[in-house]
Amino acid sequence: MLKTSASLLALALGFTLLTSCAKKDSGLAAGPDFQKRFQEALIAAKPGTVIQLPEGRLDLDRGLSLSVDNVTIRGMGIEKTILSFKNQKTGPAGLQVTANGFTIEDLAIEDTKGDALKINGANGVTVRRVRTEWTGGPSEKNGSYGIYPVQCKNVLVEESVAIGAADAGIYVGQSSNIIVRRSRAEANVAGIEIENSRFADVYDNTATHNTGGILVFNLPDLPVKGGGNTRVFNNDVEENNTQNFGAKGSMVAKVPTGTGVIVLATNHVEVFKNTIKNNNTANVSVISYFTTGNPINDASYDPFPEAIYIHDNTISGGGTAPGGEYAEALAPVVGKHLPEILFDGVVNPKQLTAAKRLPDDLRICIQNNGDASFMNYDAGGHFKHISRDLRPYSCSLAPLSAVNLPAPAAGAPAGGN
């Protein structure tokens, strides 16, 4: 009797475990109604659900959405599970997410009409081994963004690939506590962009054959302002010489073809131990918002870069064929081979000390970058006082702290540092 009871108890426990797993894991098979079943799974998902996608090219003709917290979407591999939106008819994005604790991994999203993967207003985002791509190559008809978390907290993008975006391949905007690592951005207008965000680490990435490799921007007229505290290190930023194909009138359309790293109007940025080479306009640029030529209507906006530390990088081969406004404005003055590190020289006059320079903790510091050439091209003075003297910028700033993401909840994939 005891043995029979024990057997029945074990069977009951096994059945309970099986049904519990069934609730959390939704495996979808390929087939003509895959799109319908996928969207139904996204709608019916409960916190803790893992939606397992099959191997193969899976055709979809409308955008998908998820609004349930703590859901994982998992494919069979970055080149094995391919969500193809080549025939997309509706939807602003391929997959749009408005949910906390979201994880997506091991799949590709191709040829969306708009953005590929947009994650809006989420706390806790993991994008791991995801490829977004427009397979026809660079085109102004491509979607704007590949991997696109905006107004999020605690964001991890790793081991991912972004190709062909008409704005930015990997873009994290108006967010905080961010890591972008071990990823590749290629043939986008902007490869990797951190915009109006605070506390970001961008490292061990490759940005190549974009218009601009890595951009750290702070822009006006956005709900979240005051970007800063960004570290860009151990990246390969090479040959970002693809002709700009951004939408006319957009900010990214102003990025000169041949740009390696741009720091624009943001504060507390450390760029170090990168390999930055063969970017035809400039390998590294530090500029104020005034250099864009756009008006500023946002009274609370700070247009000046401050506390920028560029050090211990390997920089070579840039400035050989400058494009865009750099070429038009600077080439007649300094020639067509621009220095590898450019600073527009525009600083906040209200911050200047009696010695007519920024306070020590807000300086632009550039040192230990080998033989990389430098120029302050005095944009504010219409190039009247151009200087190639690096000595005023031979200083150091306190290193910025590493970004650490919260430990994942029980059962969730590991992330963070």
Image (cartoon, rainbow, N blue to C red):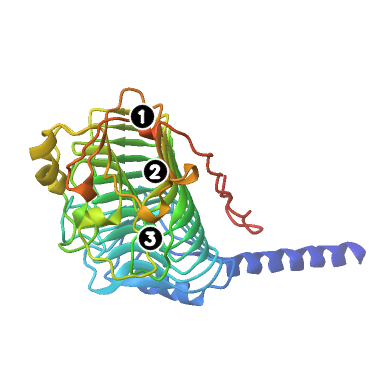
Residue 86, relative to residue 63: is it above or below?
A: above
Q: What residue type is disc 3 on?
A: Asp
Q: CA distance from mark 1 to mark 2?
A: 13 Å
Question: In the image, is residue 84 above or below residue 276?
Answer: below
Left or right: 11 as drawn, with respect to 123: right
Residue designated by label 1: 391
The structure residue drawn at horizontal position 62% and vertical position 56%, both measured from the top left corner, is 408
Instruction: Judge from the rendering whether residue 333 lies leftward or rightward of residue 192; answer left or right.
Output: left
> Which badge, 1 or 2, comes first in the chain's sequence?
2
Looking at the rendered image, the quarter that the C terminus falls into is top right
Q: Residues within 10 Å of mark 2 (few under 14, many from 20)?
A: some
Marks 1 & 3, CB-CB < 8 Å contact: no
Quadrant containing the N terminus is bottom right
Q: Nearer the viewer, residue 180 or 52?
A: 180
The mark closer to the camera, 1 or 2, is: 2
**Whole-percent x, y for residue 244 in the image:** 17, 50
| Amino acid residing under circle 1 | Arg
Q: Which mark is residue 357?
A: 2
Residue carrying label 3: 302
Toward the left, the furthest residue is 332
Mark 2 and mark 3 in contact (Cβ < 8 Å)?
no
Q: Label 3 to label 2, Cα distance in Å? A: 18 Å
Q: From the top left corner, tell me how far across and down residue 298 is, in percent.
A: 33, 70
Q: Circle 1: is it few (<14), some (14-19), or many (20+) Cα within 10 Å?
A: few
Q: Is residue 195 left or right of residue 154?
A: left
Q: Earlier in the sequence, mark 1 or mark 3?
A: 3
Element at badge 1?
helix
Q: Secondary structure at mark 3?
A: loop
Task: Give the structural element (helix, strand or loop) at label 2.
Answer: loop
